[in-house]
């Protein structure tokens, strides 16, 4: 991840990694999401995308645990 950050800060294009960041992807203040790195650090936080019913159920259960921690 550190190497990817350095490439982004250097201005390399298309650097996408997962990171635990402050975001609005869910109602949680922080969430692990795909992000695009660039000269300014995190330049874009990608949405979750389509989830199956099973994945949505798991995410809802996980939110309670994540909020508590």
Image (cartoon, rainbow, N blue to C red):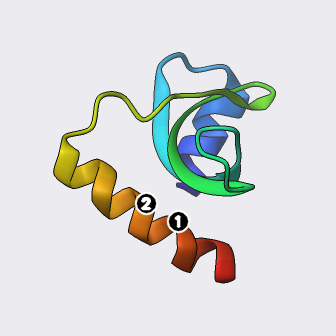
Judging depth in this view, the residue of 25 and 53 nearest the camera is: 53
Residue occupying image coordinates x 65% and y 42%: 6
Image coordinates of residue 40 in percent, x first then y, are 81, 27
Residue highlighted by disc 1: 63
Under circle 2, the secondary element is helix
Q: Quadrant of residue 64?
A: bottom right
Numbered label tally: 2
Judge from the rendering whether residue 61 lies leftward or rightward of residue 38; answer left or right: left
Judge from the rendering whether residue 51 lies leftward or rightward of residue 1; answer left or right: left
Judging depth in this view, the residue of 61 and 12 nearest the camera is: 61
Under circle 1, the secondary element is helix
Image coordinates of residue 17 in percent, x first then y, are 46, 42
Disc ID at residue 60: 2
Q: Residue furthest bottom?
A: 69
39 lies above or below 34: above
Judge from the rendering whether residue 54 lies leftward or rightward of residue 37; answer left or right: left
36 lies above or below 32: above
Check the picture and name the quadrant holding the C terminus. Answer: bottom right
Q: Quadrant of residue 20?
A: bottom right
Judging depth in this view, the residue of 5 and 59 nearest the camera is: 59
Is the residue marked by circle 2 packed among few (<14), some (14-19), or many (20+) residues within 10 Å? few
Image coordinates of residue 63 in percent, x first then y, are 52, 65
Residue occupying image coordinates x 52% and y 28%: 46
Is the residue marked by circle 1 packed among few (<14), some (14-19), or many (20+) residues within 10 Å? some
Residue occupying image coordinates x 43% and y 60%: 60
Q: Residue furthest right?
A: 40
Residues at badges 1 and 2 in contact (C-beta under 8 Å)? yes
Judging depth in this view, the residue of 18 and 24 nearest the camera is: 24
Determine the CA span between mark 1 and mark 2: 5 Å
């Amino acid at each position: 991840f550190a190497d990817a950050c350095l490439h982004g800060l250097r201005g390399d294009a298309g650097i996408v990694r997962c990171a635990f960041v402050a975001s609005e992807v869910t109602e949680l203040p922080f969430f692990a999401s795909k992000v695009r790195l660039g000269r300014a650090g995190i330049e874009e936080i990608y949405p979750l995308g389509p989830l199956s019913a099973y994945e949505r159920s798991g995410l809802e259960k996980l939110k309670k645990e994540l909020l508590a921690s």
